[in-house]
């Protein structure tokens, strides 16, 4: 379980990293994507917040976004149908999303569905569907801790949001506000030599590889794989084969992990770099934030920053819900 809080810098449009940390969950608290001991997980969340020097009461006015694990979700990208009014479009998307789960496609209390634009400026939609308990258990954990989520996101999509934000921020000029900075920013998803970049996200069960040109994801692939717990050379071989299936070959791969130590992350990067013959580096989602090294107890230094891409992306979405220009 991970937590990231981002705040607006007083007197400016900049974003500041306020706190971040993680708490380990025992195997008997989870069963795949399901939380089987929500009360115990809620206690861990409260302990984590206390360790970071904050409490649920201090977050009551924050927008909170919750992640769903990629291996617990079914997704599909479709063309947006033309000439449907908003309410009819929403109902049509919900029916299509429900078809991603076993059954006859009827919406019922056993499923949860959602829809979002596939990419910025795209005319394609991404449908989501999962079993209701995957969502309900996580909402219950927050409520037991005195919190309430305003939105839910797919973990891999949140990681991609953090990656695109970092690319935006790294290319900023001294423009006086975020909107002007975006207008003058270097192209997103390109390395310093002008080539496309990729983000490789790994957790204990899933490998997600996406390559970007500009703000657009031009190719992606997701597979079940014993990611951070597998042998680095075996993982590197899988990544090499997957890069060959993408329509565009990246020049640089940034790696974000869940559950890997700093040493394991370094081994993964080295193995993938040898197999793919390109630059491979850990992804630091906090590199461009003000206060990227919070003082005192509001950080946990043992935690590799590459492990926090997903909660960083969730925090960026939360800021955008409060009027921030966060992509």
Image (cartoon, helix red, strand yellow):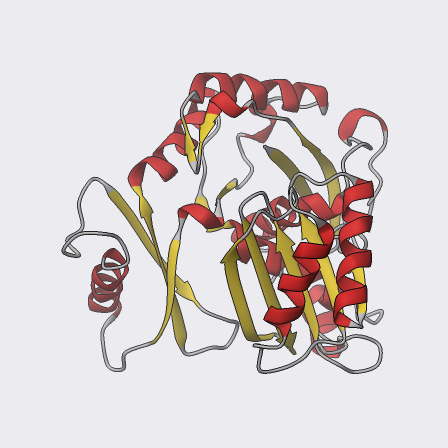
299 or 326: which is nearer to us? 299
311 or 103: which is nearer to us? 103
Q: Residue shown at 53%/41% (left/top)?
A: 63
State which quarter of the image contains the N terminus. top right
Q: Residue 325 placed where, x, y %? A: 62, 61
Give residue 149's quadrant in the image.
top left
Give residue 118's quadrant in the image.
bottom left
Q: Is residue 292 above or below residue 255?
A: above
Residue 81 horizontal side relative to residue 280, left or right: left
Q: Residue shown at 30%/43% (left/top)?
A: 131
Report how many numbered discs are placed on residues in the image.
Answer: 0
Q: Residue 121 placed where, x, y %? A: 50, 77
Residue 22 horizontal side relative to residue 91, left or right: right
Q: Is residue 8 visible?
A: no
Q: Is residue 287 visible?
A: yes
Residue 98 horizontal side relative to residue 23, left or right: left
Residue 156 horizontal side relative to residue 115, left or right: right
Q: Is residue 57 above or below residue 264?
A: above
Q: Residue 27 placed where, x, y %? A: 53, 25
Q: Residue shown at 76%/38% (left/top)?
A: 261
Give residue 208's quadrant in the image.
bottom right
Q: Residue 168 placed where, x, y %? A: 72, 68
């Amino acid at each position: 379980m991970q937590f990231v809080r981002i705040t607006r810098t007083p007197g400016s449009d900049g974003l500041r990293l306020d706190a971040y940390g993680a708490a380990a969950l025992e195997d008997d608290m989870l069963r795949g994507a399901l939380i089987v001991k929500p009360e115990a997980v809620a206690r861990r969340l409260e302990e984590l917040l206390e360790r970071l020097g904050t409490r649920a009461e201090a977050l009551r006015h924050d927008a909170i976004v919750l992640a769903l694990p990629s291996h617990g979700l079914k997704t599909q990208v479709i063309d947006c149908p033309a000439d449907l009014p908003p309410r009819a479009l929403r109902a049509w998307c919900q029916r299509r999303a429900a078809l991603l789960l076993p059954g006859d496609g009827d919406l019922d209390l056993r499923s949860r569905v959602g829809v979002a634009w596939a990419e910025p400026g795209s005319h394609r939609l991404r449908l989501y569907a999962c079993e209701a308990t995957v969502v309900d258990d996580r909402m219950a954990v927050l409520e037991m801790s005195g919190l309430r989520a305003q939105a839910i996101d797919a973990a891999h999509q949140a990681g991609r949001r953090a990656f695109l934000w970092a690319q935006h921020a790294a290319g900023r000029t001294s423009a006086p506000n975020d909107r002007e900075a975006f207008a003058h920013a270097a192209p997103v998803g390109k390395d310093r030599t002008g080539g496309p970049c990729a983000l490789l996200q790994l957790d204990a069960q899933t490998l997600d590889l996406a390559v970007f040109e500009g703000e657009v994801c031009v190719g992606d692939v997701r597979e079940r794989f014993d990611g951070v717990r597998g042998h680095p050379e075996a993982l590197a071989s899988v990544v090499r084969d997957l890069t060959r299936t993408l329509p565009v070959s990246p020049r640089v791969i940034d790696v974000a992990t869940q559950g890997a130590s700093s040493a394991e992350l370094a081994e993964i990067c080295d193995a993938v770099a040898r197999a793919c013959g390109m630059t491979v580096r850990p992804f630091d989602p906090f590199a461009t934030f003000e206060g990227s090294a919070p003082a005192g107890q509001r950080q946990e230094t043992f935690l590799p920053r590459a492990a926090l891409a997903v909660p960083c992306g969730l925090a960026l979405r939360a800021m955008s819900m409060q009027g921030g220009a966060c992509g």
